[in-house]
Image (spheres, rainbow, N blue to C red):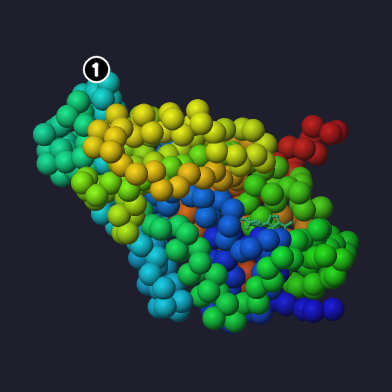
Amino acid sequence: MKTFDVVIAGGGLIGGAIALELAQAGLRVGLFERGEPGREASWASAGILSPAPESPGMIPMVPLGKASMNLYPGFVANVEEVSGQSVGFRPFGTMDALFSRDAPRDLSTLIALHHGLGLKAEPLRPEDAREIEPAISPDVEAAALRPEEASIDNRALTRAVLESARKSGAEIFPEHAVEAIRREGGRCTGLRVRGENFAAKWTVITAGCFSGNIAGVEAYAPVRPAKGQMVSLRADEIKIERVLWSEKVYLVPRNDGRILAGATVEYVGFDKQVTAGAVSKILSDAIELAPGLANARIEETWAGLRPDSPDHLPILGPTDLEGLLMATGHFRSGVLLTPITARMVREWITEQRVSVDWERLSPMRFATARRETAV
Ligand SMILES: Cc1cc2nc3c(=O)[nH]c(=O)nc-3n(C[C@H](O)[C@H](O)[C@H](O)COP(=O)(O)OP(=O)(O)OC[C@H]3O[C@@H](n4cnc5c(N)ncnc54)[C@H](O)[C@@H]3O)c2cc1C
């Protein structure tokens, strides 16, 4: 039986970054991916790096998001150096454009919320917003600049992270679907993969929205897919420097001139079809935000599945099975949270402590609730 220090189930950005971090710490790592590594949510993402909460329920995630944002420049430098590949990091801030009649009041609420959470946000008059980002519609009523936010080319990042992990000594097994965790008494002793056993002291589940399909993991990771549809545009005559948000849509510029527009949030199972209705809505919202996009070429459309959890917060940390950790449920912020997730899993495995409190994100919050309901 092949033996590792750590086996990881799922070869997306989260699994790849954990493999890299652990391999660089000198551990023997095996990463198992059921298909081609890095082709699910991590490929489909928009790559916005924003620790701001999208709803009050997401506020517990803000400290983690801020910690990850602080790690990002060093994470990018490491990955680009080891892989020799560029990952399209754009630390230029993001801008919220407000169009409602209540825009001045909405703006004060937004600024106060950000400041209350220790996040930078600056109010802008419409004319200043349009001077900084001329593509924004003249109908804009107010705007806010979030100077510490960023974006990254998540497809390039995922490829580079997996390549860096491989170059650092992690063994990557494509086309190796994990069937189950192996357990002996109260311990997890590795993975069963295509009928074969792989032993390890530590096992980490990073199979995104598919994590709950691995036998033995369901109670810890009750994840479900949240479909997101996206459109990629190219418009030579307009230039966008920062991520732009309206209440309805976001626009994400890439270094190669593409502008991504997205995204829907749909609960329709594991379906990844692109629909006419979603594309039509994304396009009309995008054109409302930046009217010059009406003449843009549509280059690509796609859909991907975010790993959502019952309370929309990540599922991160050890379980009551010794040696078994979860790192999933990152929902809409998995790209943002990649560096801190990898860092904390490495800290737990090598030092049995973590530098950011992750108690609130424990996989045991679901396993315990299930047991209590069953009693
Ligand atoms: C449209 C869209 C837009 C998004 N925008 C953003 C954004 O702007 N910013 C942000 O931070 N986040 C964003 N996200 C969320 C982010 O992409 C995800 O949270 C993140 O990619 C999750 O990474 P992951 O590695 O956990 O999952 P995945 O990338 O889905 O990787 C899981 C891997 O596990 C593999 N797997 C599944 N089952 C098994 C098995 N049994 N055995 C072996 N392997 C298995 C899968 O094939 C897959 O490769 C977006 C997501 C979508 C879909």
Residue 331 point in image, percent of width and height: 55, 44
Look at the image and tell me whether residue 214 can be seen.
yes
Q: In the displayed orientation, state which residue is furthest to the top.
A: 101
Q: Which residue is mark 1?
A: 101
Judged left or right of residue 177, residue 236 is: left
Mark 1 secondary-structure assignment = loop
Quarter holding residue 2: bottom right
Q: Is residue 346 visible?
A: no
State which quadrant residue 82 falls in. Answer: bottom left
- Amino acid on which the number 1 mark rests in the picture: Arg
Image quarter of the C terminus: top right
- Disc 1 CB within 8 Å of nearest ligand 1 atom: no
Q: Does 129 sit left or right of 95 as displayed?
A: left
Tell me where residue 245 appears, x and y as whole percent.
32, 37
Nearer to us in this view, 308 or 166: 166
Residue 196 x %, y %: 85, 70
Q: Quadrant of the N terminus?
A: bottom right
User: Does residue 245 appear left or right of residue 275 in this picture?
Assistant: left
Compare residues 55 and 207 and report the one nearer the observer: 207
Residue at 52% of width from left, 45% of height from top?
302
* Relative image position of residue 155 (x, y in whole percent): 47, 59
Q: Residue at x 59, y 70 (%)?
A: 19
Residue drawn at point x = 17 percent, y = 29 percent = 138
x 80%, y 65%: residue: 193
Q: Nearer the viewer, residue 325 or 320?
A: 325
